[in-house]
Amino acid sequence: SAIIRYITGYYSAVRPHWYNGGLTPNESERLYYLQSNAVASFS
């Protein structure tokens, strides 16, 4: 149970990942939505 909380809490959301350019998954998702909203409001 503690391991699952660690993986889903810190490791998956907060820990930087190399495939995101060193960003955390949360930060990568935030940047994605900022960019997609900019494109949506442009059209």
Image: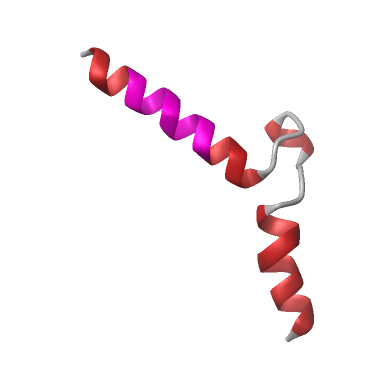
How many numbered circles are shown? 0
**Residue drawn where x is 75% and y is 59% of the image:** 11
- What stretch of residues is rendered in magenta? 30-38
Residue 39 vs 27, above or below: the answer is above
Is 31 on the left or on the right of 19, as rendered?
left
Examine the image and state in which quarter residue 21 appears. top right
Query: Which residue is at a point 33% across and 27% down the rendered structure image?
Result: 37
Question: Residue extending furthest top?
Answer: 42
Give the main secondary structure, helix, strand or loop, of the magenta stretch: helix
Image quadrant holding the N terminus, namely bottom right
User: Is the image coloured rainbow, by chain, by secondary structure, or in one colour?
Assistant: secondary structure
Instruction: Name, please, the residue furthest toward the left.
Output: 43
Q: Is residue 27 left or right of residue 24?
A: left
The residue at the point 51 percent across, 37 percent down is 30
- 9 horizontally vs 31: left or right: right
Locate residue 21 relative to residue 34 in the image: left or right: right
Decide: is 39 above or below 19.
above
- Tell me where residue 41 appears, x and y as whole percent: 24, 20
Residue at figure coordinates x 76%, y 50% from the top left = 15
Q: Position of residue 42 (x, y in %)?
A: 25, 13
Give yes or no for residue 15 being in the magenta stretch. Answer: no
In the displayed structure, 7 sits above or below 15; it is below
Q: Which corner quadrant of the image does residue 27 belong to?
A: top right
Quadrant that contains the C terminus: top left
Determine which quarter of the picture holds residue 19.
top right
